[in-house]
Amino acid sequence: MSSLYVTEAGSFIKRDGGHVIVGRNNEVLFEVPLERIEDITVFDSVSITSSLVTDFIERGVPITWLSGYGKYFGTLINTNTIDINKHKKQFDLLDDNTFRVAMSRKIIRAKVRNQLTILRRYARNLEDINIDAQIANIKSVRSHIGECMRVSELMGYEGLISRLYFEALGKIVPSTFAFTKRTKQPPRDPFNAMLGLGYSMLFNEILAGVINAGLHPFVGVMHSLAKGHPALASDLIEEWRAPIIDSMVLSMVSRNMVDLTEFDNSDKGCYLTAEGRKAFLTAYNKKIRSGNQYIDDRKSYRESIYKQCKQFASAIIHGDVDLYTPLEIH
């Protein structure tokens, strides 16, 4: 199975027998057997025939649209997995403060542990860089998580920890990619540009997993209900950000897999060029399909996400926080 990424503006996607054809300006760029496509992501102004869209939906192949800058627009996906009983339980749990606080606390603790693991892993061989102060501050703030009685309090501490984390992260990257804080919409530097695109791709993975598990993606436990916001996907992405995207981008810049010529920087923000985006998506596809060493059955990260979403669904159905174990790396 393979993922299909179509990044060239003006491209078209159509079906020819048992193959999917991708072309541009009346020229065929490449073709892929339809049965091998697991998911498809299109960037910018790419056209796809309605008959092929129907084929993908019938086969359960999600189609995701992103802007040329990597902004998430939406996903088309088969809705046969919708489970109205799970949806009802999700809405019921919105009024269960004890459940929401306990689950949110569990997710945030896992996220923070993963962030600390990434910082220590990449900083240990840097002789002239010291992030001890940031790590100490993160631990200090983390100590208050157990005291919180409301989700809003937890989110406040989570936001503070994230600011400290990105401050430290900006120090341990190679000097050409150094940054001082997380910036988005628009990103203001190459590292943030890659994080933004990576988080959009990962968000789509989580969204597909949530829907596959029969859950309502717009009803979360940590992030508030809001029009047009898949709150549950925003909840469940948190534990995966550092292990998948942050570590991947750190690896790319540390191993010189990307350079500054692959970014467009202007007053509108900093974004990957078409060539840079291709290199990034190649690395992402390799990462998401690689074995997840932190789960016993050694599934790929993509498979692990689907498994975690189903585990979360079980916790929702039974109203039991203990049935969900967030991913923690070490």
Image (spheres, rainbow, N blue to C red):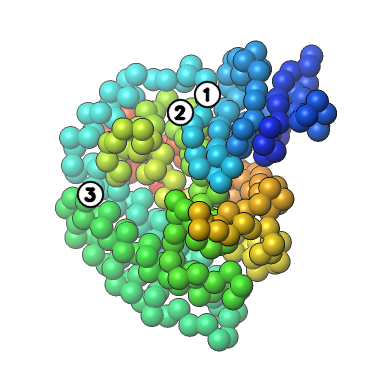
Q: Which residue is drawn at 74% across and 18% down?
A: 15
What residue did someone put label 3 on?
151
Q: Does 205 sit left or right of 116 as displayed?
A: right
The tally of labels here is: 3
N-term-proximal mark, 1 vs 2: 1
Q: Residue 223 carries which label?
A: none
What residue did someone put label 2 on?
211
Q: How crowded is mark 2: few (under 14 residues within 10 Å), some or many (20 or more)?
A: many
Observer-nearest of 237 and 316: 237
* Residue 192 seen anywhere in this rendered image of the structure: no
Q: How far apart are marks 3 and 1 (CA)?
A: 31 Å
Observer-nearest of 305 and 178: 178
Give percent across and percent down for residue 218.
35, 32
Q: Does 235 sit left or right of 97 as displayed?
A: right
Observer-nearest of 214 and 248: 248
Q: How far apart are marks 1 and 2 (CA)?
A: 8 Å
Q: Residue at x 65, y 68 (%)?
A: 254
What residue did someone put label 1 on?
77
Q: Residue at x 30, y 43 (%)?
A: 223
Q: Which residue is drawn at 64% across and 30% down?
A: 46
User: In the rendered image, which quarter is residue 157 located in?
Assistant: bottom left
Give percent across and percent down for residue 118.
51, 65
Q: How far apart are marks 2 and 3 (CA)?
A: 24 Å
* Residue 308 seen anywhere in this rendered image of the structure: yes
For badge 3, the amino acid type reads: Val
